[in-house]
Image (tube, rainbow, N blue to C red):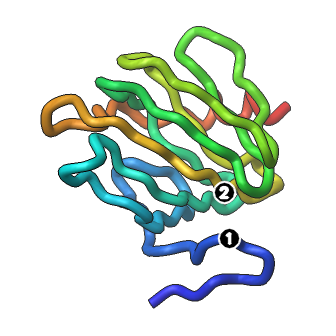
Amino acid sequence: MATTEDNELFNKGEAAPAGYFTGAAFIHPLVGRDNNNEFALGSVTFKPGARTIWHTHPKGQVLIVSEGQGFYQEKGKPAQRLKKGDVVNIPENVEHWHGADAQHKLVHIAITNYKDDQNVVWLKPVSEQEYADVNK
C-alpha cells in the first residue's frame, strides 16, 4: 500500500494506467460512484513531465489543485497554468488534457461525473511538441 509523503494530503495511490497517461502518474481513489453519488472522486499525482492524454468527459469534471504546478489545456486554446488552490470546471465533451509542468509535480483532486456508465472518453496522447510548447 502506498504511503503519504511529507506534507501530502493523501497518499499518491497506485500507478495510473500507462495507456491514458504519459510519464509517472498515480491515482488514489477517494469516493466511488454509488447510490448517493453520480461521480467518482480521486487524488491524482503527476511527477514532473507527467500528463493525461487528450480526453473528454460526457458530464464534465472539476479539478482542485492541492499541490505543485502544471497545466490544463482545451483543444485549440492556450494552456492555462495551474497552481495550488486553482479550481478548473471542465464542461461536458470538451477535449482537454492536464498534468504537471516539466519542472514540478502536480497533485489535483478530480471530481468526475458519470453519464450512464461512462465518465471519460480517452483519445490520443499529447504530442511531445504540444507539451514542449506549453512549457516554454
| Mark-to-mark CA distance, 1 and 2 | 9 Å
Tally of marks? 2
Location of mark 2 (residue): 107
Left or right: 43, with 123 as reference point: right
For image coordinates 73% across by 59% down, the residue present is 105
Q: Nearer the viewer, mark 1 or mark 2?
A: 1
Secondary structure of the residue carrying tag 2 is: strand
Q: Please tell me how crowded label 1 is: few (under 14), some (14-19), or many (20+) other residues with Cα within 10 Å.
A: few
For image coordinates 45% across by 39% down, the residue present is 53
- The answer to whether residue 44 is above or below residue 128 is below
Q: Kindly check if marks 1 and 2 are in contact, taking CB atoms under 8 A apart as contact.
A: yes
Q: Name the amino acid, label 2.
A: Val
For image coordinates 46% across by 33% down, the residue present is 61
Q: Name the amino acid, label 1.
A: Leu
Question: In this view of the protein, which residue sits in the foreground, 26 or 7?
Answer: 7
Name the disc covering residue 9, or none. Answer: 1
The x, y position of residue 9, in whole percent, is 68, 70
The quadrant of the picture occupied by the N terminus is bottom left
The x, y position of residue 126, in whole percent, is 52, 34
Secondary structure of the residue carrying tag 1 is: loop
The x, y position of residue 54, in whole percent, is 44, 31
